[in-house]
Image (cartoon, rainbow, N blue to C red):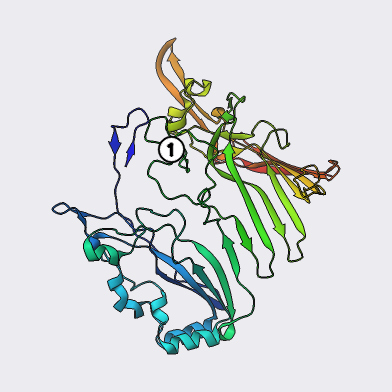
Amino acid sequence: MNYSPQSTSELSRIGGTKETYYLNAIKTRTHTALFLKSLKRDGKGAYDINTINNTILDNSISSSLRLDDIYLLKNEDYIGLINIGFSASNSSSYNSELRNSDTYDEVYDIHDITSSQIQTFLYQNQIKRIHFIYDVNYPLCKNTYNSFDISDVAADGDIDTKYGKLTLDAIEIYERGNVKLIPDYRFDYKKFYSAHNPDYSLEKWDGWGMYKSDGTLATNGHWPTSDGQQWSLKKITTPLGGTIDIEYERDTYSKISGTLLDNSITHYGGNIRVKKITVKDELNNEYKTLYLYSNNTNVIGTSSGWCSVEPEFCRHSSNDFYNTNKHKLYNYPSTPVLYNVVTVLKGQLSDNTGADDYNNYYTKTVYNFTVPDRNMVIHGSIPVSISSIPVCYTHLIRDSTSQIGRINSITSYNGEDMLIGSTNFNYINDFNNMGLYTEGAIVSEINIL
């Protein structure tokens, strides 16, 4: 369900069906990896309502599966596993867990290995087993509409408890004999902090589709802010006790297809971007990577972000770009926020007190990319005349949007900001008399040392 940015009374509804395919196995010349799934609470499909008593028809609900285990076997052991009875159809008796004519019959799932013989064979012959541990409470983005137990609905035709999103807590790794040799990889989302893990709310979104803490039903209630980092992975703990901390920030942009915005204010949009990654080993040694997204490669500066066109809910309609009507062309691209310049600093990036010092780096690398520009799409008409009388028109359409995202240069500096080396990538863009091309071909890579 959606509504127009001009009026909250204009509604639209889109529905449909889909086929879902799950990966069962990957097989190489010598080995096979098996992927075993199980039912999960979130990701339910749309469901029908009994119009007489306004209850949910549980038989109309489709569910989704999650990945529980990956088993790596030699091919001969995989054949041996099948010979003792392993099959996707082993779980047919569990189809009652599902609804809407869904079955487990073609899917490798945890019910297929409940036999003690199959379980023992797997443990004895597995080269490696990767086990995914999820939080049983589904704590991220709680009260999501399509996260619930079907058995709950079947009991009284209503959803009594709404859960959140599937949340990966840890990864366990087992060797042959199902012996765990190393501690787990653990993941943290700051799920116990409401600022990082708010409940689902119908109107708390912005025009780019990201979370907005003060989003409202009003037609101007979805203008983007610095929100958007909620529910994201914040920390990884490695088996040796080291940690990887990830800090995010909202995308910003300063141009729409090359047309400059008012940069006296910050324009938020797009998705989120990584701001900083801090790696700390088991001895507490710290190493940081900082990402800068400004044109002057400094912490503070005009954003190097460009977008091709803004969403209708948060559009700077008075910007000169929209006066060209380029955004109305059928083949004009719609891109996320992309960056013309990205600078990566690596090093200690801290002073003696531990505070951030972005001048204290070991290396600086500057990446330059091609971003959306309105001149990438050209439509025009040329009159063709006979005896000075126009009889027809030649219509010209030139589309160079395949250039978007390509790398133009990589420049490296040392900690003293001295140039170490530079690589420039040159592309051929003029295709006259060269056959049919769909995108610019790279013709040279120039390394400057």
Above or below: residue 260 compared with residue 91: above
Name the residue at 66% across, 39% down. Answer: 293
Image quadrant of residue 20? Answer: bottom left
Q: Mark 1 belongs to which amino acid?
A: Gly
- With respect to residue 326, does 431 lie above or below? below
Q: Residue at x 40, y 36 (%)?
A: 216
Q: Quadrant of the C terminus?
A: top right
Q: Pinpoint residue 375: horizontal percent, then vertical percent.
A: 56, 27
Q: Determine the residue located farthest toward the top in the rendered image.
A: 388
Examine the rendering and report whether any part of residue 369 can be seen: yes
Taking depth in this image into account, of 419 and 269 the one nearest to the observer is 269
Percent x, y of residue 320: 52, 20
Picture quadrant of residue 9: top left
**Residue 128, percent across and down?**
58, 78
Left or right of 423: which side holds 56?
left
Count numbered badges in the picture: 1
Q: Is residue 34 above or below residue 155?
A: below
- Residue at x-position 34% and y-position 61%: 148
The residue beneath circle 1 is: 215
Image coords of residue 182 (percent x, y): 64, 76
10 Å crowding of disc 1: few (<14), some (14-19), many (20+): many
Left or right: 416 in relation to 164: right
Residue 299 sits in quarter: top right
Q: Is residue 109 left or right of 62 when viewed as pictured?
A: right
